[in-house]
Image: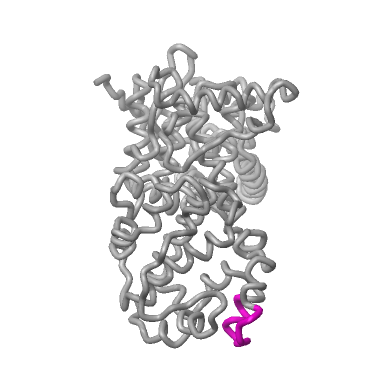
């Protein structure tokens, strides 16, 4: 193990004297006006009190000797903010601080999120300076010469990643999928534009209103991949990161050759579309396939985000296509709950029937969405409406059969003798999937049976325990 070098350094020694760099595994600049104004208040209060020592925080740096730069492993938000404050304090002076004297100002911030926050924080800082700061030069010198940071330097890139993972696993805001981003960016052997595109797509997905990474990775792909291997999949934590780690493109393993060949055909199509069959204009994925680290991982995740949007978007999703399910309900007696399904679509129904917000019903809904995703992944739109109905019947019968639904109830069904999940994994044609016979249970229902749907939607469910 290489040594960690921990020191106390003046801010001047770090933001002015070091060639700081933001590595591509870092998240965007997400500090808001509230964060930077709080930092300004802290700095200025200590300045006014003339405190001789003020420690601003801690940072972790990895020295990249091959590139002659210092990568920020931890402390990016604070260092960018300090550089911004110092630049604005000095921009009108006789010797303003520029990119030459504040190296972080030369760094590219490819995320649109970063650019937006930087502009907002610039405006907030300028307002603070105008309202509060009487002697900008003295305040700037105080920050540079008096304020300090705990400086930890890691000499080994592997340790830098381990530190990044460990720090963010100890109570910081990063989710497991954020650590996956860092891991796969490290394995990404591509041009800068490809790196930026991967990171930009990822960060947009983090905060997306539909198909965010929590839903797509933690609640869908994680469970499908684990169920496929008969492994528990209740929650995706840092302990299960290996679920989404695999081989490198440089590995000479026969089992990844098909994926690599598909990837190379895809790239050939991008370069020579007139020469390559249109079938290769899009990459082909299967949710349970082996993971190939780097660029293909990011494309894998983006592929399933788009699938999720196609199926489950609240406004445009396939499951809310009224033309699909309205015809099936035309023969049913009208009622308030049936009208809701008929008017708004299936997705609205599974989100709004009485009891839909119970924990157990949430597990059932997730099972249903996983199965629909898996079917669409395997057979596309062929017999998709009938397949959705089959998945719906099989999943929601659990609610009619069970007084209480726990997560283990779901996995018992997934691994059970008459599992629709296992059946879907085995079959090779969509028609075979539809031939699955659902075991009888105490109350039958279907889309053309008002009694059955009423049971599902109303009185029978309301008698169940609140689980």
- 456 over 19 or under it: above or below: below
Q: Position of residue 195 (x, y in %)?
A: 56, 28
Left/right of residue 42 with respect to residue 58 in the rendered view: right
Q: Position of residue 146 (x, y in %)?
A: 44, 33
In magenta stretch: residue 162: no
Residue found farthest to the top? 66
Quadrant of the image occupied by residue 162: top left
Model colouring: one colour
Quadrant of the image occupied by residue 251: top left
Quadrant into which the N terminus falls: top left
Q: Nearer the viewer, residue 92 or 126?
A: 126
Quadrant into which the C terminus falls: bottom left
The residue at 58%/48% (across/down) is 380
Magenta range: 330-341
The residue at 48%/66% (across/down) is 392
The residue at 63%/48% (across/down) is 124
Q: Position of residue 273 (x, y in %)?
A: 72, 25
Q: Nearer the viewer, residue 191 or 106?
A: 191
Whether residue 127 is visible, yes or no, is yes
Whether residue 20 is visible, yes or no, is no
Q: Nearer the viewer, residue 32 or 88?
A: 32
Residue found farthest to the right? 274
- 434 over 322 or under it: above or below: above
Q: Position of residue 64 (x, y in %)?
A: 43, 17
The residue at 39%/17% (across/down) is 252
């Amino acid at each position: 193990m290489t040594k960690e070098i921990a020191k106390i350094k003046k801010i001047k020694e770090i933001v002015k004297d070091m060639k700081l760099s933001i590595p591509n595994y870092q998240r965007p600049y997400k500090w808001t006006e509230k964060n930077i104004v709080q930092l300004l208040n802290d700095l200025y209060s200590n300045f006014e009190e003339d405190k001789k020592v003020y420690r601003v925080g801690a940072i972790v740096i990895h020295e990249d000797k091959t590139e002659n730069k210092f990568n920020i492993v931890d402390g990016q938000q604070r260092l960018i903010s300090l550089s911004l404050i110092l630049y604005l304090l000095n921009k009108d002076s006789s010797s303003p601080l520029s990119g030459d004297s504040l190296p972080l100002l030369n760094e590219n911030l490819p995320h649109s999120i970063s650019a937006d926050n930087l502009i907002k924080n610039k405006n907030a800082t300028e307002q603070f300076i105008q309202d509060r700061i009487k002697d900008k030069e003295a305040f700037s010198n105080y920050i540079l010469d008096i304020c300090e940071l705990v400086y930890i330097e890691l000499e080994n890139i592997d340790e830098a990643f381990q530190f990044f993972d460990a720090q963010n696993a100890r109570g910081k805001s990063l989710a497991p999928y954020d650590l996956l981003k860092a891991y796969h960016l490290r394995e990404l052997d591509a041009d800068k534009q490809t790196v930026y595109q991967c990171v930009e797509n990822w960060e947009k997905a983090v905060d997306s209103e539909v198909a965010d990474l929590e839903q797509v990775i933690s609640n869908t792909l994680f469970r499908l991949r684990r169920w496929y291997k008969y492994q528990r999949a209740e929650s995706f934590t840092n302990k299960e990161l290996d679920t989404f780690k695999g081989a490198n493109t440089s590995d000479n393993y026969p089992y990844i050759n098909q994926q690599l060949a598909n990837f190379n055909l895809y790239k050939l199509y991008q370069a020579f579309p007139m020469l390559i069959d249109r079938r290769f204009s899009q990459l082909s994925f299967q949710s349970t396939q082996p993971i190939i680290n780097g660029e293909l991982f990011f494309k894998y995740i983006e592929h399933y985000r788009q699938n999720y949007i196609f199926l489950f978007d609240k406004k445009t999703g396939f499951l809310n296509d009224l033309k699909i399910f309205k015809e099936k309900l035309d023969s049913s007696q009208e009622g308030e709950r049936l009208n809701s399904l008929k008017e708004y679509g299936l997705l609205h129904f599974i989100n709004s029937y009485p009891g839909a917000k119970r924990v157990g019903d949430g597990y059932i809904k997730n099972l249903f969405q996983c199965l629909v995703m898996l079917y669409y992944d395997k057979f596309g739109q062929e017999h998709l409406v009938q397949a959705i109905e089959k998945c719906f019947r099989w999943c929601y019968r659990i609610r009619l059969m069970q007084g209480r639904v726990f997560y283990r109830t779901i996995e018992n069904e997934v691994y059970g003798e008459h599992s629709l999940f296992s059946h879907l994994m085995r079959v090779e044609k969509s028609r075979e999937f539809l031939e699955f016979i659902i075991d009888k249970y105490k109350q039958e229902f279907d889309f053309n049976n008002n009694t059955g749907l009423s049971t599902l939607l109303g009185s029978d469910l309301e008698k169940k325990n609140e689980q």
